[in-house]
Image (cartoon, rainbow, N blue to C red):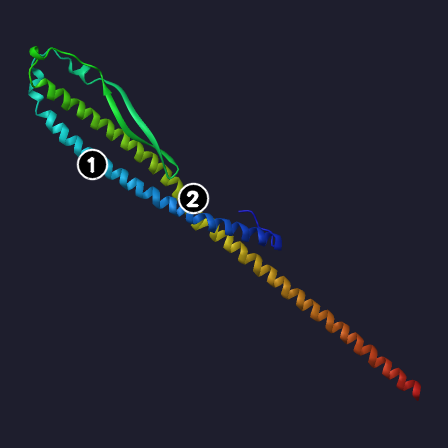
Amino acid sequence: MAEIKLTKNELRSQQGRLGQLQKYLPTLQLKKAMLQTEVNDARNEIAQLEQLYEQKHYQVEAYSELFTEKTPVDFKEATRVVSLNKHFENIAGVEVPHFESIKFADLTYDLFDTPPWVDPLITGLRSLIEATEKIKVAREKKSALEKELREVSIRVNLFEKILIPRALVNIKKIKVFLGDQELAAVARAKVAKEKVEAQKAAALEQKTLQEATDAL
């Protein structure tokens, strides 16, 4: 750390810096608290989505034995994702994604030539894929929020543990030095005054003695 100047100008500079730090710190602390809340909400959202995924996976798994049966339907094509739409929202200064919609490839097949379990299976598979994509987007959101939270936490710690304490120490150091300088100046002035008064007294005594001598 560079050595500070022990001057009145530097004292004013340090006091101004301290004022700015103390003014901005509550804003950072508030942002940190908001981000922590949002991260917790994102984690809860992911947990709920993962639970929903497990439920849908269990439902689809009930059809697992039927996959061996031959059907005119291409399940891979039936579950092909054509587009995934997301929108972004600014939360505490962070652009976070939100799942909006998912579109699958159009699929046509002869209902009379297809087993009745195909429709619910396709619906279940698509629902499972949608649940997976929702989890991915929710994790993207959590990741963005956690990244910003880490950065803000670093800044809060920097303010609380380094910058503000350093400014306080610098201010105290400068004030002590200036106070010592002021006391020293007062002491020097007092000594100088005493010397002047002593010189005046000596001169007056010399004058008086001279006058007495002349009178004799």
Mark 2 vs 1: CB contact within 8 A: no
Q: Residue at image x 57%, y 59%?
A: 175
Q: Amino acid at mark 1?
A: Gln
Q: Amino acid at mark 2?
A: Arg
Give the x, y percent position of residue 48. 20, 36
Mark 2 or mark 1, which is nearer to you?
1
Can residue 7 be seen in this snapshot? no
Give the x, y percent position of residue 1. 53, 47
Picture disc at residue 155: 2
Residue 54 lies left or right of residue 89; in this view the side is left
Q: Is residue 74 above or below residue 140?
A: above
Q: Please tell me which residue lies in front, 107 or 162.
A: 107
Kindly state the secondary structure of the residue where label 1 is placed. helix
Q: Residue at image x 44%, y 48%?
A: 25
Q: Please tell me which residue lies in front, 16 or 187.
A: 16
Q: Which residue is mark 1?
A: 48
Q: Is residue 96 above or below residue 196?
A: above
